Image (cartoon, rainbow, N blue to C red):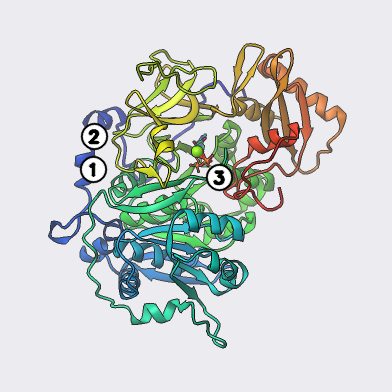
Amino acid sequence: MDWRTIEKLPVAGGTVPNLVDYEETCRTFSWEGAGALLDGLPGGSGLNIAHEAVDRHVAHGRGDRVALRCLDRAGNSTDLTYRDLQEQTNRFADALRTMGVARGERVFVLAGRIPELYIAVLGTLKAGCVASPLFSAFGPEPIRQRLSLGDARVLVTTEALYVKKVAKLRDSLPGMEQVLVIGQGGDGRRSDTVDFHEALGAGDPSFAIAPTDPEDMALLHFTSGTTGTPKGAIHVHQAVVSHHVTGAYALDLHPEDVFWCTADPGWVTGTSYGIISPLTHGVTCIIDEGEFDAERWYRILAEQQVTVWYTAPTAVRMLMRAGTEPARDADLSALRFVASVGEPLNPEAVVWGQEAWGRPIHDNWWQTETGGIMIANYAAMDIRPGSMGRPMPGVEVAILLQGDDGRAKVADDGTVEVIEKPNVEGELAIRPGWPSMFRGYLHDEARYEACFAGGWYLSGDVARFDEDGWFWFVGRADDVIKSAGHLIGPFEVESTLMEHPAVVEAGVIGKPDPVAGSIVKAFVSLREGFEPTDDLRLELIGFARTRLGPAVAPRELDFDQHLPKTKSGKIMRRLLKARELGLPEGDLSTLERDA
Ligand code: ATP
Ligand code: MG
């Protein structure tokens, strides 16, 4: 398959999609109208994410619906209805108030995907405090960095994580006054921690939600650290309008859905779409404590009759490694819609999904900074494999003329040039004004300011749009390779290599070269049954040459079964490059353990 051909795949049938007429919806859409889909706080006292996600459904007589179905590692499940969740989150909010935690103060949660994590995050929002979930597999130093940068006042964690990672950090975090421990050990009680469930038990189940303003800070999310030190992006309660609308349009959520978002709430996807968006739609969310395991995942999809599934390219590639057989053995008859985010989704993977599951994968694009989905392939629209799709209604996206560094070229008078012609690469930019836009990087005003020019938010990604308005990802501005006068996006080269039956994953970098500026170098992981021989190396280079031409195909190719990735599964090209060139490896706080 030539990845540039537009291959139209059939749209999954069944439920009528929320977005049927894209053009018409874009024409008539307004964020004010979208805001009216939500209730707002009783008595017109503002907007609060947790009210829209939880209490609203109880008020509308849907309290008995299961909100969260939490599966533990052993596969046991605990259900929390919307009413249960309302009561528990009220109790937690009241516990915070009793402890004297003030509005706007930061409450961090460091725990696996267990019910308490969800209760703590939503309860924090009800108290008017700021929630920041951290990925539980972080080591002590990345945890300390983030707690310190985020001015943590409270931490909620588990006994095991406290003993292993947090206890030794206490002295260096004097502002972190309270630590609530889930499953606190019975004997030898500590004087400097509080038992989470005791505090919850003492909390008032009828707590009245804090009157929060739409512009009040609600969430603090750290970026994935793919390109450098993670940044703490600030989001406000108003973001829930984006969460809700994108859940309807880009994930096609309907109230009767069983929805599984596989991302951890420590990453923005796991909060925006693993907690908030689906709950605002009143769906049942599947929460799995376990890590990736192909067999387990197919079992969950089948047993829970998941209807909408939101995952990431890294998971899709791992499932591709496991082959089509386990997929065909699983009962995926309930599955209606599959979406993916986080990295470019190779066209090969979209087609594979169609073959293995009978469902194509709908790629969508967004960032920690955008807070919600910005560009997507929608349920009612044909998919162009390899494309991120089209902008969300209400979201204005442009491609800006780029300078030598791959970033938008900003003139002396501060203006930028919007590219009107299709198929020209430039920096992807978004017109500010959507509700879930970040309102700052915590303690880094200058960096925030630098994200805007000429009335646009600059994403740092390079992309292009085609004649029909579909957007195509080229690469991060930092990763784009300049070779002998060509600008080469690593994604294109990686996707081509993945079309070869031996290749399951690829990372491509530019390696400095005195003649060409840079040459393209590829690192590839092989599918089981293939040996990393010189013959295969030549074959792969040849394969890429025929498809991409000699100017774009890799000149060098190494085999690497463990490409370095972030903990959220993104290939870290900057690390491949640093290692190749023997340069300092930079911030590794989000590096996956065995890479
Ligand atoms: P950091 O900003 O710390 O380097 P990060 O950019 O990986 O880390 P996130 O906000 O989690 O942090 O990721 C957003 C980025 O992920 C996007 O800017 C883009 O580069 C990439 N991305 C997300 N979705 C897609 C997609 N569908 N296609 C291509 N790239 C994507
Ligand atoms: Mg980023």
Task: Say if residue 291 shows up in the picture.
Answer: no
Residue drawn at x 28%, y 78% as measured from the top left: 204
Q: How far apart are marks 2 and 1 (CA)?
A: 8 Å
Residue drawn at x 84%, y 38% as measured from the top left: 531
Badge number at residue 34: 1
Tell me if 213 is positioned left or right of 147 in this view.
Answer: left
Badge number at residue 357: 3
Of mark 3 and mark 1, the one earlier in the sequence is 1
Q: Dot 3: within a 10 Å radius of its alpha carbon, few (fewer than 14), some, or many (20 or more) residues? A: some
Badge number at residue 29: 2
- SS class, disc 2: loop
Residue nearer the viewer, 136 or 169: 169
- Residue type at mark 2 is Phe
Of the two numbered discs 2 and 3 in the rendering, the one whose residue sits closer to the viewer: 2
Task: Give residue 260's position: percent from left, percent from top.
Answer: 47, 55
- Residue type at mark 1 is Ala
- Residue type at mark 3 is Trp
Residue drawn at x 59%, y 37% as measured from the top left: 349
Q: Dot 2: within a 10 Å radius of its alpha carbon, few (fewer than 14), some, or many (20 or more) residues? A: some
Task: Give residue 558's position: percent from left, percent from top.
Answer: 78, 32
Residue nearer the viewer, 256 or 504: 504
2 and 1 marks in contact (CB < 8 Å): yes
Residue nearer the viewer, 384 or 12: 384
- SS class, disc 3: helix
Of mark 2 and mark 3, the one earlier in the sequence is 2
Tell me if 293 is positioned left or right of 17 in this view.
Answer: right
